[in-house]
Image: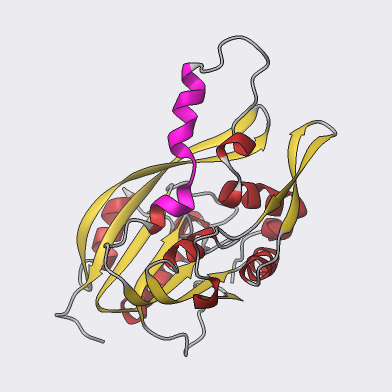
C-alpha cells in the first residue's frame, strides 16, 4: 500500500503544529518593526487563527456522549471537543504528534521552538487550554484508513485536513457510516490540495471534491451545511501558509442503520 512520506515525524513539523494549535496571536503573527502598526495584510491574517477551535465548533450546541477526532495532530481539536463531549478519542498517524498530545493531556507543558529566520529561533511552551476537560480525552496512534475494528461508534466524528493526505481516502469514507451513530454528526474539513506524494492521482476525485463527497456520503448522511474556514501555518517570521479549507457538517441518517 502506498503510504505518505514520513514528514510528520520531523521535529520541525512538530514545532510548527504546536504553534499552529496552541500559539497565541502574538506568537504566530509577525512582529512589526516600526511604521504602521495595523497594516491591512496583518488584519486579514487574524481570522485564520484558531482553526482547530473553529472546526470543532461546527457541531451542534448540544452535549454529546462520545467523539472521534481523526487526524487530530497535536490535539487541540480533541481538547475543544471535550468541552461538550463526555468521551473523546483523538487518532493520528504521527507517533510524534500523538506523544505530544498525550503529554499535554497529562498536564505537561511542552517546550518547542518557533523558527524566526535563518539561525534565529524563539523558545515557546505549549499547554492544553485551561477550560479543556483532559480527563475526558484519550489519544492513540492509528491509520485513518485502517482503524482498529473495535474502535466503536461515536456521536460525533471530526476529520480536519485529513482526506487529501490519505493514500486511499475512499477507505475512510466507506468506513464513516459505521463510525457515526444514526442521528450523530460528522464534520469534514479539507483544503482539497491533492498532491501526488500523498495520494496517487487515480485516487483523487474526478471533479469537485465537494461533489465527490456528496456522492460518496449521500446514501448514509444528510448534508446540514457547508462553508469555508481559513487557516494559517507560520513557517518563519515572513513566510506563512494561508489556506482555505472546505468544511461540511453531516448528520448520519436514520434510514440506513448499520
Query: For the point 30% across and 55% down, which residue is it?
Result: 248
Q: Relative to residue 251, is residue 31 drawn left or right?
A: right
- State the residue in front, 126 or 182: 126
Q: Relative to residue 27, is residue 136 drawn left or right?
A: left
User: Which percent across, then down, holds residue 74?
Assistant: 60, 61
- State the residue in front, 107 or 160: 107
Residue 114 vs 172, above or below: the answer is: above
* Residue lying farthest to the top in this orientation: 35
User: From which residue to which does the magenta span run?
Assistant: 40-54
For the C terminus, the quadrant is bottom left
For the N terminus, the quadrant is bottom right
Q: Magenta residues: mostly which secondary structure?
A: helix
The image quarter containing residue 9 is bottom right
The image quarter containing residue 8 is bottom right
* Residue lying farthest to the front in this orientation: 130
- State the residue in front, 210 or 135: 135
> Magenta stretch containing residue 52, yes or no?
yes
User: Which percent across, then down, holds residue 123?
Assistant: 78, 44
Query: For the point 58% across and 47% down, which residue is it?
Result: 20
Query: For the point 50% across and 71% down, which residue is it?
Result: 144
Count every numbered label the image shows and give the total. Answer: 0
User: Which percent across, then down, holds residue 100?
Assistant: 68, 64
Query: For the point 46% across and 61% down, which residue is it?
Result: 80
Residue 107 vs 58, above or below: the answer is: below
Amino acid at each position: 500500500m502506498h503510504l505518505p512520506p514520513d514528514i510528520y515525524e520531523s521535529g520541525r513539523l512538530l514545532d510548527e503544529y504546536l504553534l499552529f494549535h496552541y500559539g497565541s496571536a502574538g506568537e504566530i503573527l509577525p512582529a512589526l518593526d516600526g511604521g504602521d502598526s495595523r497594516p491591512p495584510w496583518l488584519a486579514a491574517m487574524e481570522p485564520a487563527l484558531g482553526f482547530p477551535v473553529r472546526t470543532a465548533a461546527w457541531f451542534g450546541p448540544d452535549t454529546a456522549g462520545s467523539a472521534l477526532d481523526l487526524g487530530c495532530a497535536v490535539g487541540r481539536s480533541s481538547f475543544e471537543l471535550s468541552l461538550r463531549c463526555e468521551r473523546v478519542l483523538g487518532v493520528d498517524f504521527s507517533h510524534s504528534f500523538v506523544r505530544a498530545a498525550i503529554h499535554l493531556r497529562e498536564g505537561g507543558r511542552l517546550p518547542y521552538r518557533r523558527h524566526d529566520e535563518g539561525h534565529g529561533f524563539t523558545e515557546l511552551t505549549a499547554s492544553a487550554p485551561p477550560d479543556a476537560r483532559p480527563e475526558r480525552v484519550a489519544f492513540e496512534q492509528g491509520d485513518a484508513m485502517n482503524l482498529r475494528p473495535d474502535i466503536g461508534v461515536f456521536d460525533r466524528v471530526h476529520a480536519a485536513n485529513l482526506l487529501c493526505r490519505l493514500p486511499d481516502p475512499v477507505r475512510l469514507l466507506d468506513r464513516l457510516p459505521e463510525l457515526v451513530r444514526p442521528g450523530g454528526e460528522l464534520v469534514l474539513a479539507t483544503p482539497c490540495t491533492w498532491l501526488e506524494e500523498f495520494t496517487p492521482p487515480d485516487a483523487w476525485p474526478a471533479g469537485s471534491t465537494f461533489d465527490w463527497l456528496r456522492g460518496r456520503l449521500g446514501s448514509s448522511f444528510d448534508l446540514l451545511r457547508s462553508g469555508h474556514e481559513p487557516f494559517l501555518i507560520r513557517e518563519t517570521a515572513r513566510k506563512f501558509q494561508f489556506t482555505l479549507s472546505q468544511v461540511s457538517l453531516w448528520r448520519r441518517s436514520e434510514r440506513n442503520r448499520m
